[in-house]
Image (spheres, grey):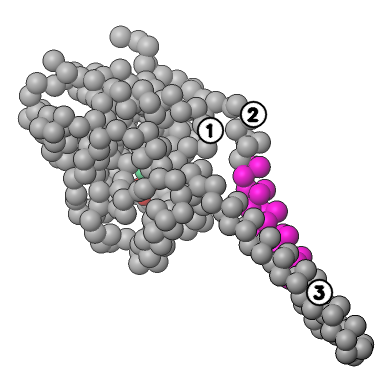
Amino acid sequence: MKTIDIIVPCYNEGENIDMFFYETQGVISSITGYSFRYIFIDDGSCDDTLEKIKGLDNHVKIKYISFSRNFGKEAAMYAGLRASRGDYAVIIDADLQHPPGLMAEMIETIEETGCDSCAARRVSRKGEPRLRSLFARAFYRIMNRYSDIEILDGAVDFRMMNRKMVRAIVSMPENQRFSKGIFAWVGFDTRWIEFENVKRISGESKWSVWSLTKYAIDGFIDFAASPLKFVGVFGSVTAIGSVLYLVIEILKTLIMGKDIPGYASTICLILFFGGLITTVLSVMGEYIGRMYMETKGRPIYIEKESNIDED
Ligand code: UDP
Ligand code: MG
């Protein structure tokens, strides 16, 4: 019998755990030929998430890892994948925004097509703030155009993968992780299934406007070196342009004699180059900052408590 690990990142989901478990159990009890195991990741919750996980009816295998603080969903997903031993692993949100029913469809797709991975994609952004969907769309467009990878608009982290793909992902040691990019980067044959957006059952999304913006910039920089090239080209074009301008001015002075000195244009140039240099430096700074964080080689998460090794 094949085994499937259900990986659930949870941050302050105390109110949702029971409902999530109930729904998921309903779905997997009707799937035959597979045995399931849960791996809950308590991502430093400050509510009763961990107690709720421990209190679940354990006639099924329930594993958990609890972090020493909040390390973010990326770290939680990584911890889950690392702990996974099953033939397949599926990552799913605890707030029921990823309909557990789709797991049956994912298994079917994998069985029928023999693909390595089956992922879910939201076809509508109903119930989501307008501004957020607008920015999300723009993000995907820029990302796909200028980075090394292609991410489908609406792709979520809800995805079932075989052991080979899980191993490839776990072997990527980077500290600042952007899973949507990593899934695409490792390759493998991926099929997509579509679903309508659902509202979370209770509690609030952990994403603020600021954290989403940061997530988008991080994701882009992690998979794109093009901003560096862009500012490089921009810088050299303006530098060449300014030399040409200087030559023209010198010739003009030699031929037509001295003009009235132009303070305005001088100041304009100084400001322009000041701005240009700052822009270039700050883009480089983003990359260097990342290199600095990566060279520290800090662990992606720190465990406080877990029952992974117990049996
Ligand atoms: N999550 C997590 N750590 C965090 C933030 C979120 O493990 O720092 C989990 C959260 O409990 C949920 C999933 O990641 O199961 C998705 O989070 P959320 O619903 O806040 O994101 P959204 O659905 O709005 O994208
Ligand atoms: Mg959610």
Badge 1 amino acid:
Asn
The mark closer to the camera, 3 or 2, is 3
- Where disc 3 sits, the SS reads helix
Nearest to N terminus: mark 3 or mark 2: 3
The residue shown at (72%, 59%) is 278
Which numbered circle lies on residue 89?
A: none
Q: Main secondary structure of the magenta part?
A: helix
Which numbered circle lies on residue 175?
A: 1
Q: Quadrant of the N terminus?
A: top left
Kindly indicate whether the residue at mark 1 contacts the one at mark 2 (C-beta within 8 angstroms): yes
Q: Position of residue 37 (x, y in %)?
A: 24, 22
Does the residue tagged 3 have its C-beta within 8 Å of any atom of ligand 1? no
**Residue 177 in the figure: left or right of residue 100:** right
- Where disc 2 sits, the SS reads loop
Q: CA distance from mark 2 to mark 1?
A: 9 Å
**Which picture quadrant has residue 135?**
bottom left
Q: Nearer the viewer, residue 4 or 60?
A: 4
The residue shown at (75%, 66%) is 273
Badge 2 crowding class, 10 Å Cα cut-off, few under 14, some 14 to 19, many 20 or more, is few
**Residue 266 in the figure: left or right of residue 168:** right
Kindly indicate whether the residue at mark 2 contacts the one at mark 3 (C-beta within 8 angstroms): no
Badge 3 amino acid:
Val
Q: Which residue is mark 2?
A: 296
Residue 62 higher or lower than 117, as above or below:
above
Which numbered circle lies on residue 247?
A: 3
Badge 2 amino acid:
Lys
Residue 228 higher or lower than 184, as above or below:
below
